[in-house]
Amino acid sequence: MHALAIAGSVALLGAPAPGASFRDCDVCPVMIVLPAGSFEMGSAASDPARGADEQPRHRVTFARPFAVAKYATTRGEFARFVAESGYRAAPGCLIQRNGSWFDDRRAGWRRPGFSQTERDPVVCMSWNDGAAYADWLSRKTGHSYALLTEAQWEYAARAGTETPYYWGTKASRAYANYGTERCCAPAAAGKDRWLHTAPSGSFPPNAFGLYDMHGNAWQWMQDCWHRNYDGAPADGSAWLSGTCIDRVMRGGSWNCGTSTIRAAGRELHDLSGRYSVVGFRVARTD
């Protein structure tokens, strides 16, 4: 993999081949360049788990390359942001215990209800927390960072494939950390030995060199929630019409079943909510 490490020097237009990596600063996330291109967004008719909210399937075209973080934002990366910026996430997080959810006012990204390493994806994140982190990166680097759009995420997750998972048609714990088939509880078996979050990079990357696009922790999207794709943008931009109180999440998590972690799977939550299964990832478009 070709790596670029000079802060502020990477131009994405005409960038190196897909998979090229760079960092804009010593505390910035490692970014992977994705190529311009098109894909079919939504679930295929052959997908037995396809949902009405994943329809109609439609073509999305990215006219320019963009970059996506190699990993979901880690606990260590978020801690460095907090230390440098003074940002304070509001207290409290919905924690899952014994199959039920509890609003624990003492919990938060430092105390999500289970142990983590600094390499684990940060959780107990609201949409606002993710947006604040992206804004900080933008100010720090002079580049345009943001939460991924829903189209960017699915294009990145599929990495040129049309199957439910980047590795094929069947879910596998050799490739992702996910939960029991019946919602919602953690599970561990085989290579997936974590009941909760796994350290980033514990499973193989997809063809774009991105890790944990399926499972581990949900990822907030820029987009406002819509119940289907009628009227969705065809250029990969964020869909920001509507009230936008509810925002889209993608990827599934450590307590989700196999249908939820598919590349086409979608979910929504209140943008101010914090859950021990939800984190985020960033993109850069300039």
Image (cartoon, rainbow, N blue to C red):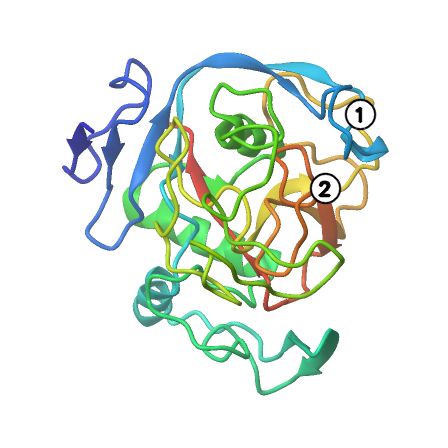
Q: Is residue 120 above or below residue 159?
A: below
x then y, percent, for residue 47: 73, 26
Three-letter code for the amino acid on which mark 1 is drawn: Gln
Question: Which quadrant does the N terminus fall into?
Answer: top left
Neighbour class for label 1 at 10 Å: few (<14), some, many (≥20)?
some
> Which residue position holds label 1?
55
> Seen from this angle, which residue lies furthest bottom?
106
What kind of element bears circle 1?
loop
> Which residue position holds label 2?
224
What kind of element bears circle 2?
strand
The residue sitting at 74% across, 50% down in the picture is 268
In this orientation, does residue 62 appear? no
Q: Is residue 240 above or below residue 272?
A: above
Three-letter code for the amino acid on which mark 2 is drawn: Cys
Question: Closer to us: mark 2 or mark 1?
Answer: 1
Query: Could you say which is closer to the camera, residue 236 or residue 75?
Result: 75
The residue sitting at 49% across, 56% down in the picture is 132
Question: Nearer the N terminus, badge 2 or badge 1?
Answer: 1
Q: Is residue 188 above or below residue 22?
A: below
